[in-house]
Image (cartoon, rainbow, N blue to C red):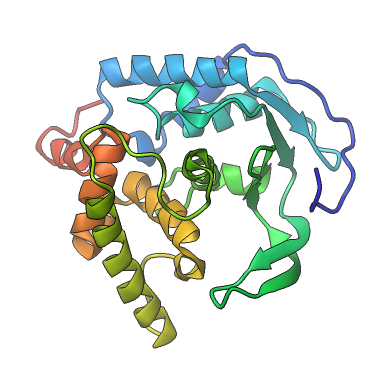
Amino acid sequence: MSGLLGSLFGAAKAGSELDESAWTEVTGLPVFDGLHVEHRLRLRQVAQDILRDKQFSGAAGLSLDAYKVTAIAIFAALPVLELGADAYGDWVEVIVYPGEFLYEGHETGPDGVVHHVRHARSGEAMAGGPLVLSWQDVAASGAAEGFNVVIHEFAHKLDMKNGAVDGLPPLHSGMSVAGWAAAFNAAYKDFCRRVDLGEDTEIDPYAAESPAEFFAVLTECFFEVPDLLGAAYPAVYEQMRLFYKQDPLARLESLEHDPATP
């Protein structure tokens, strides 16, 4: 686990059974509003597949139980609801800290210069390696406020599948790399300009860090606040709709017409 400070204490492999209390509570969060019964059945199956495929370990004294790992698996299942758990690849380990953890390593800046960094993080996805999460931040996810650390880090894992962490995951047949690049490049340039000018952006300014972070943050927005993303960058929303094969904005609109939708 190179790059992370802090020892693993009491690390344990969690069971693969889905916890029913976690299922009830987590799927009751606003981010899952508008999912019809058939979607929820599929969500449950994908979450079970993630629990089967991944190994969860507690770090820095965190006791991992079935509730915690199920909550993580449910959030992780939402982006790949139509793609399946296999879309995340064959890496295995998910490490969970009680709260933010210290990361130390090297990062390449926009100028191409490699910098040594040491700071607190709520999540980290490592190419070919584990995915690390802060349980405190997992517990704060899903409120339809634009924040979801699980979706963010698992989006990085999708991005990494083409061999680079650059905001361009492997696209499906029928999707255009040129179309993706045109939508994302224009939006990223506009967003960075707004952040540089000190504008108070509704989208997390962290998205301006790099194209990879832009993709991950906007994936959070796509599922948590699709109306915000659709209004700010409709071309990006359309590319994500094609990539994730979902339309969260349509789910929101269906709620407006039928508030009783489960």
Q: Is residue 28 above or below residue 171?
A: above
Q: Is residue 168 in view from this perspective? A: yes
Q: Nearer the viewer, residue 24 or 53?
A: 53
Direction left: furthest residue: 257
Q: Is residue 240 left or right of residue 46?
A: left
Is residue 242 toward the left or the right of residue 189 in the image? left
x and y percentages locating residue 219 in the rendered image: 39, 49
Residue at the image point whose x is 52% and y is 46% from the top: 156
**Residue 262, position as x, y percentages in the image:** 27, 25
Residue 35's x, y, as percent? Answer: 28, 28
Task: State whether residue 198 is above or below residue 137.
Answer: below
Q: Confirm whether residue 227 shows in the render.
A: no
- Image mark count: 0
Counting from the top left corner in percent of width and height, residue 203 is at 38, 65
Q: Out of 177 and 30, give the one closest to the viewer.
A: 177
Quadrant that contains the N terminus: top right
Residue sitting at x 27%, y 68%: 186
Residue situated furthest bottom in the rendering = 197
Q: 35 above or below 229?
A: above
Depicted 50 relative to depicted 162: above or below: above
Q: Is residue 133 left or right of residue 50?
A: right
| Among the 4 quarters of the image, the one containing residue 97 | top right
